Image (tube, coloured by chain):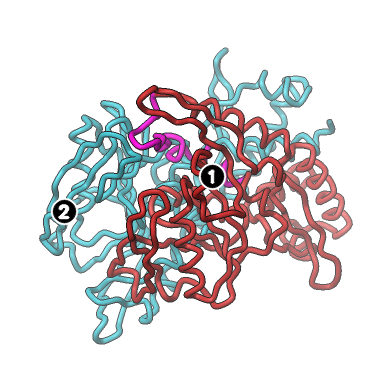
Chain colours: A cyan, B red
Amino acid sequence: MKRSERLVAMTHFILDRPRELISLPYFSSKYEAAKSSISEDLGIIHKMFQHEGIGYLETVPGAAGGVKYIPAYSKTYSDSFVHQLCERLEDPERLLPGGYLFMSDILGDPEATRNIGRLFASAFSNREIDAIMTVATKGIPLAYAVASYLNAPVVIARRDPKVTEGSTVSINYVSGSTRKIQTMVLTKRSLKKGAKVCIIDDFMKAGGTINGMSNLLKEFEAEVAGIGVLAEAEDEEEERVVQDYISLVQIVNADDRRGTIEVRPGNLIDHI
Amino acid sequence: MKRSERLVAMTHFILDRPRELISLPYFSSKYEAAKSSISEDLGIIHKMFQHEGIGYLETVPGAAGGVKYIPAYSKTYSDSFVHQLCERLEDPERLLPGGYLFMSDILGDPEATRNIGRLFASAFSNREIDAIMTVATKGIPLAYAVASYLNAPVVIARRDPKVTEGSTVSINYVSGSTRKIQTMVLTKRSLKKGAKVCIIDDFMKAGGTINGMSNLLKEFEAEVAGIGVLAEAEDEEEERVVQDYISLVQIVNADDRRGTIEVRPGNLIDHI
C-alpha cells in the first residue's frame, strides 16, 4: 500500500474512533508498514487535523501507548456555527406559547446535531466523563452526538417507566418554571457507582429538569461532571436552580404576543 | 499543500458529508490544487473506501457534477457486526417479562448505534429517501444514525404532544400484540406532502407500532420508502401486520420463565 493510500485508510480509521487509544504496532500490522512510516503518517494526520480545526492526535508514550484522536473544534469553527444557529433561531415564526421556541427542525437535522455534539465535546474535552445523560425526548439526539465524540455511553431518563427497561429508580422533582411535581426514572443497570456523568439537554428555563437529573444521579451515587444545554432562556436567570453549565445559545426577550425574539451566543464559546 | 496532506483533509471533508454532491472546482479552490490533481486524489479515495469496505465515491458527470460519498458497508463488515450483535444479545440475563429483551446498553452505545445506522443506510442506499421517521423513545438513536449516513432529516412521532412542538396531527392505532388502543402524534410542520419516508424502530413484535407510523404518514400524504427494525420477534410472524421490512436480528424462542433465548441474523444481510 502506498503512503497516499494508507493515509486515506488511516484517516478514516482514526476519525471513526475518537478518544480510543490505538497502538503503533496495531497500525503497523494492519497496514503492513514499518513503525517509522506509521509515525510519519501520524505526524501528517496530526498536523492536518489541527490545520482543519477538528482536533489533534494525543500521543500516549510507553509500551502500552499509542495515539488518540481528541475532537476539539477550533474557536473559528465554533464561532461561525454558533452565529449561524443564532440567526436560524431568531425567527418570530418559531415562537410558541409560553416563551418556548420551535426547534424540532434543527434537532431533526443530523448535520446540525453532529455540529452541536462536536462543540460540546470540544468544551468538555479535558474533563473525565464516563457517561452522557439526558431525559427523553428532545435531548436524545444531542446526547448521542456528544457521546459519539467523547466515546462514552448514553443513559436516558424517562418520565414513564417501560417494561423493556427492567427495574428502575425513580425520583420526584419540581419543574422550575411551572412548579409542577414530576417524576423521572432511570433503569437500575444503566449507571455504575461513582460514574462521572455529563448532563445534556435541549432547553433550560429555570433548570428544574436538569436539577432533577442531578438528584437522580445522587441516587446512583454518581456525580455530575458537566452540564450542557443547547438553548437557555436568559429571562429566567433570577429563578435559576442550576449554576455551573455550558449553553450554546441564549434566548432573550422571547415574546409570542409581540412576536419578538433575540438569540445570542451562550457561554460555550468561552470554554473552547 | 502536499498530496499526502491534502488526502487527509479531503478524506475528512468527504466522510463528513455523506451523499452530498461536492464539485471538483470546489475542492480545487479549497485546497488550491489543479483539477487534474484533485481528480487523482478522488481516485485514490474511491479506491481506498472500497478497499476498506465503507462505500464508494459516485461520480456525477456534467457542469453541475461532482462526487458524492455513498456509505455502503461491505457484506463482510455487515456479517461480522450482525454475528457479534447476535452473540451479545443471546444472554438469558437480558430476558424481561413478556418476551422483551433488555437492549438499552446496546442502544446506549454510540459505536453500536453508528454501526447499526451504517448497515441500514447500506441496505437502503439505492432507495430515494427524504426523511427518517421513528416513534419516541428507543428508536431515536437508530433513526439519527441512519439519517446521518443517508443525509436526511429525522422526524419523531410521540405518544404525547408537547407544547414545544406546535400544532400536531394525531392518529389512534391498535398495538398488534397487546390489542390496546394507543395514540401517536406528529408535528404538522415536520413533513412535506409526497415525502418518501424510511421508518426505523428498535423492536417489532406484531408490527402494530410500525403500522401506526405508516398510517400517520398517510395523513401527511407521505409514503413509506422503507422499514428497518433492529430486532424482530420471530414468534409473532403469523400475526404480523407489516410485511415488507428489513431486520438486523431475529429473536427466536425468548422464554423468560425457562431462561432460554436464541438470536439469529435477520434479513438485512440479503439486502447488502
**Badge 1 amino acid:** Glu
For label 1, count other residues whose C-alpha is less than 10 Å away and answer few (under 14), some (14-19) or many (20+): some
> Residue, x 67% and y 37% (percent of image)?
B78
Side of A28 where B254 appears, left or right: left
In the drawing, what numbered circle is on residue B237?
A: 1
State which chain disc 1 sits on: B
In the drawing, what numbered circle is on residue A182?
A: 2
Q: Nearer the viewer, residue B154 or A14?
A: B154
Q: Secondary structure at mark 1?
A: helix
Provide the major secondary structure of the magenta segment.
Answer: helix
Task: Tell me, yes or no, if residue B28 can be seen here.
Answer: yes
State which chain disc 2 sits on: A
Image position of B162 with respect to A254: above or below: above
Q: Nearer the viewer, residue B242 or B131?
A: B242
Q: Which residues are magenta?
A: B93-118
**Badge 2 amino acid:** Gln
Rendering quarter of residue B60: bottom right
> Residue, x 74% and y 37% (percent of image)?
B52
Residue A262 drawn at (x, y percent): 32, 75
Q: Nearer the viewer, residue B60 or B31?
A: B60
Image position of A107 with respect to A95: above or below: above
Image position of A69 with respect to B141: above or below: above
> Residue, x 22% and y 32% (percent of image)?
A220
